[in-house]
Every structure is written in structure tokens, then in C-alpha cells.
Image: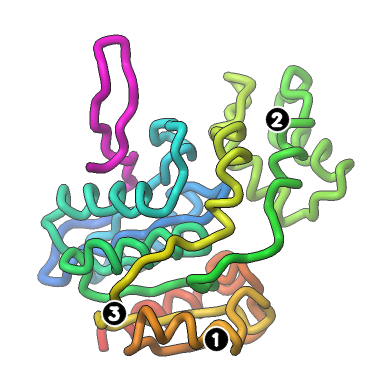
Amino acid sequence: MGLVVWTSDGYHSVMLNTIVHGEPTSNPPLLIAHGLYGSGRNWGVIARRLSDERQVVAVDMRNHSNSAWTQQHDYPSMADDLAEVIDHFGGQADVVGHSMGGKSAMTLALLHGEKLRKLVVADIAPVTYTHSQIQFIEAMRAVDLSSVTRRSDAEQQLADQGVEKALQSFFTQSLDIKGQRWLLNLDVLAAEMPKIMSFPDITGTCTKPTLFLSGGASDYVLPEHRPAIRALFPTARFAKIPGAGHWLHAEKPREFEASVRAFLNA
């Protein structure tokens, strides 16, 4: 079961919000799972370009953007969410996942491998990271939304707290200015941050074709992570995009698109 939410008449299963690009083709659909604090909309340019060969479905992960909010934010639950979307779009798909979405996609591959044809994991490894992203939640919470009439107002408040320019723009894409609220379940994301930073203990392996695509200037996927990757994904291939950091798809979109396209079509 995927996302389950409570309404006045009980619990109901609700599929993730999807943004669909293109029409079905003879190729499997491509599912894109974004990272922490992101949204399916962030992937619009890449999704549209890749939709010339296959239907592309970008999702909003739970507790993000236009998908439902829930008290759980762990990788098995997010993998179930993705599996439900794949079932809706025919039962099997190629998957690209970045950061948190990459860990969700890896968990999908290990728990629901029959739904996957090929997997691209963007700049993340199946390991526990020691850094936290809680400082960004604190920065967003500190924004006085009652004084925000345009995105630049919120960006300035984030800048005053030391948030770098690129992340200011990224975070405010999840800001509902008219509603004076963040389209992020900040309370649950903060409470579940240890689970987000970790990776579940899952037995078994995935032998489907898998590409670990990293930013050349990023330190998220290191040589010492390869044993953990190989243990779960024994056929994994590795590639780097020179000059790109953790947000490699935003920093080098054409190079990222070309790498994904070449791997999916190989």
C-alpha cells in the first residue's frame, strides 16, 4: 500500500501527485523522484526533454508540494508510494531518483524489483550520512510569511540567515505566497530527519541495470561507499558529471539529461 491519509470518514489510500510529460511509447515510462525539499516541478525541463522518447512522470514525494502529508517519512513507505505510481502507469518503469528520491528509488528496487527495468541513482549512496539538513528547516520556519508578498522577499529573509543564493531560489519554489505557507511538512520532516539521513537495513540485492551518477565536485558518493553499493547493487555502474555538485541535475542539466538518456537507451 502506498500513501495512506486520514480524513473525517477514515483512512484512505491516496496516490502521490504526478506531473506527466509526453505520451506512452514503446519504451517503459520514466519515473522521477526528487530530493528533500524539492518537487516534481523542479524537474520540468529535464522531464520535458526526455519525454521525446518515453512518457515521463515526475512525482511530488509525500510531505512535499501537492502530495498528501503524513506522519511517516521513511524509505519503505516512500518506496511503496513509488510502486503505487508505477502500477498506475502500467506496472513497470525506469526510475531516476535524486538524493532522498534516490534512496527511495533504491529501496523500491530492493523491495519491489519486479516493477523496475533500469535505475539511475543521482548523487546518493545507500548509507547513513552524518550531516543533517535540519538547519534549512529552521531557516524556513524563521521566515516571516506574513510579510512576504513575492518570492524575493522570502529569499532575502533566507539570505539574512546565511542560506546560499541557489538554495534560496530552490526552497522558495515550495512557497505558497498567497496561502502564506510552505508546501513542505516541516514538522514531520524535522521529526523524521534521522530516517531521511539513514538507509533501511534491507536484505537481498537488485541485479537490474543501475547507474550511480554523481557530481564530480560532490562528496555524497565516495570511494568508501562502493562496498555498500556493490553489496546491494552488484551490477552497478558509476559515472560522474565534471564540475557538478550535489544538485547535478540543476547545475548541469544538459549533461545530466545526456547521461540518463544514454543509459536508458543502451
Bin the neighbour count of mark 1 within 10 Å (Cα to Cα): few under 14, some 14-19, many 20 and up. some
Which quadrant of the figure has residue 265? Answer: bottom left
The picture places residue 131, in percent across and down from the top left corner, at 71, 61
Secondary structure under the numbered disc 2 in the rendered image: loop
Question: What amino acid type should be assigned to the residue bearing mark 2?
Answer: Arg
Q: State if disc 3 and disc 1 touch (CB < 8 Å).
A: no
Question: What amino acid type should be assigned to the residue bearing mark 3?
Answer: Leu
Identify the image quadrant of the C terminus.
bottom left
Q: Is residue 117 left or right of residue 108?
A: left
- Marks 1 and 3 sit apart, C-alpha to C-alpha, by 16 Å
118 or 29, which is in the foreground? 118
Bin the neighbour count of mark 3 within 10 Å (Cα to Cα): few under 14, some 14-19, many 20 and up. many
Residue in view at x 67 percent, y 77 percent:
219
Residue 52 magenta:
no
Q: Quickly name the residue at label 2.
A: 150
- Marks 2 and 1 sit apart, C-alpha to C-alpha, by 37 Å
Q: Is residue 1 left or right of residue 7?
A: left
Residue in view at x 62 percent, y 69 percent:
246
Secondary structure under the numbered disc 3 in the rendered image: helix
Q: Is residue 76 above or below residue 50?
A: above
Q: Is residue 88 above or below residue 262?
A: above
Q: Quickly name the residue at label 3.
A: 264
Residue in view at x 48 percent, y 64 percent:
98
Mark 2 or mark 1: which is in front? 1
Which quadrant of the figure has residue 5? Answer: top left
Residues in magenta?
1-20
